[in-house]
Image (tube, rainbow, N blue to C red):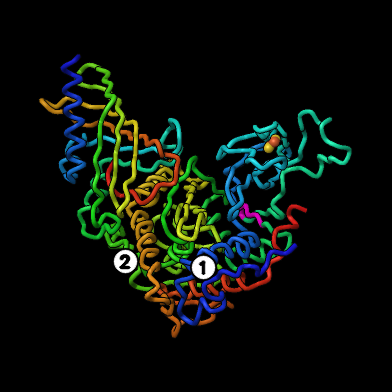
Amino acid sequence: MADLRHDIETALYREAHLLDSGEFNAWYELFLPEAIYWVPAGSGDYDPNEHVSIIHDDMTMLKKRIDRLYSGHAYAQIPASRTHRAITNVEVEDEGDGVVNVRCVMMLVELARHRQTLYPARVTYRLHRAGDNWRIGYKKVSLLMSDEPLPAAAFLF
Amino acid sequence: MTGDDTETDLTRPIEQLIRRGAIHRDVYCDPAVFDREMTHIFDRTWVFLAHESEIPSPGDYKTTTIGRHPVIVNRNDEGEIGAFINRCRHRGPTVCRNELGNAKFFRCPYHAWTYNNAGELVGVPMPQGYGADFDKSRLGLVHVARVASYAGFIFGSMSAHGPTLEDHLGGVRKFLDAYVATSPTGEIGVYKGYQKCVYSGNWKFQLENGVDPYHVGALHASAVTPEALAIYRQGKGAVIAMDGHGVTDHTDWGPMPVDASLSGGFNLVIFPNLIVLRSQIRTVRPIAVDRTEIITSVVKLKGVDEAVNLQRMRDQEFEFGAAGTFFADDLDIFERTQQGLNSSAVDWLEFSRGLDREEMRNGYMHGFMSDETQHRGMYANWMAMMTAATPGIAEAAE
Ligand code: FES
Ligand SMILES: [Fe+2]
């Protein structure tokens, strides 16, 4: 179990590093084709088909979202936000068959428009083992500020 | 008591802030102009509060704002819609701080004065402490002076005087009718939850932008599809200055599409705080001269396949909200605009596009699709309100 936990933490740090260094296409490759990338709005848990979300992307949408960032015309991201994210409080639940459910806390700091904005979040994943790596089947980023008015946030959580 | 013309700290007289085809930067930057907007516009005209489907049942309530006033809009036990200032009549706290809920009573936590959902003060602990002239019937929650609905959109006015809601909406009523008629049953609802955004900029940037086809091909070059862009570039349709509100009318291109795609239909900016377009009901909340919140509901159509409604919401989430592929760039440009306007090196902004080619049709000034006729109409309305003697809101509190 200690090894599994270490493996998962390593995978999460790697993912955070890809996002913080702007390697969005490599980040996209971590996701399985049927994955969902979800940033809920409002407080509490809900069915995303009954309630509006901040982001609810399937992989076609996420690809378009990323391509836009590289288009040269995504003006809110010129210059791109700089981000640092610390991943902590990692909890791993082994489902067996190479599938784990992960819960962690992310302290994401974004620098944009000469302002630092803090986006603390609880992040849950469903990860699937793929050889030495882990693929993302589901990523949900529950922002502490999910029910607050947010400034332009075109970067990736 | 009337609350007019006591401001002495305007940098420049209101009358000098707008001229033909140009607007002075103080309209967006002077805090005294903002103060006057709160008293002369938001304390006076009809302000959008909620869609009826947000509070469908007796006792349902929503908290919102009218300008600087915290407001509860609700249904009483009989299902009648009312609106109150969210403020205890004893010493002032808000009596409700949930965004949405259902309540028979609102109890102030401080000393437990209790109001029913019709706003009446029904409970005061240890009432023997008050004298003989203490009259609970005078101490109910203060009513928003007038509350009215049109096509399911609920508005409140802090002033007991002035045009009716129908007169205020004027020609825009037929567009609201058409919006609701997009549903085969003639009924719309909203999904649970809101997209909530904030920007460091003046509230009127959002009003201008809600009816601004000119920017779509430029600012949204990374998000707009080539097909939609081609239609915009044809310049079909019209922009309309309609009774102080702004309309972009693409209906010659097609009716309001059931799938809410960027094709046909229209955008409405209903002065001063409501934007209706595609699958959105947007409420504009001015917070300060350089700070604004946008609260958006996603509209679903009754009688339409659930998959179609769900796709409306997924598209809305993708394109709008703080992370939206369209709206993040709008929010960002609003902040850049405020930064630019904060420079007093340049006084005037250009709003002259289409001045030489606009024309009156059916009683309303129409411009070409990329023109600024609709903006000039909203600012003429703004000027009329800002320079009118206002009756103030004192009557509302009796
Ligand atoms: S302040 Fe509300 S009960 Fe006293
Ligand atoms: Fe826009």
Q: Quadrant of residue B87?
A: top right
Element type at marker 2? Answer: helix
Q: Position of residue B346 (x, y in %)?
A: 38, 76
Up-down: is B184 above or below B24?
above
Q: Quadrant of the N terminus of chain B?
A: bottom right
Does label 2 point to a residue whose CB lies under 8 Å from ligand 2?
no
Q: Which residue is mark 1?
A: B246
Q: Which residue is mark 2?
A: B217
Asked whether the viewer can see residue B255, the reply is no
Q: Position of residue A130 (x, y in %)?
A: 14, 27
* CA gap, disc 2 and disc 1: 20 Å
**Magenta span dominant secondary structure:** strand
Residue extent of the magenta highlight: B151-157
Residue at position x 57%, y 49% from top?
B187
Q: In screen coordinates, is B106 left or right of A156? A: right
Residues at discs 2 and 1 both on one chain: yes
Does the magenta-highlighted stretch encompass residue B347? no
What amino acid type should be assigned to the residue bearing mark 2?
Gly
Residue at position x 53%, y 51% from top?
B184
What amino acid type should be assigned to the residue bearing mark 1?
Gly
Asked whether the viewer can see residue B154, the reply is yes
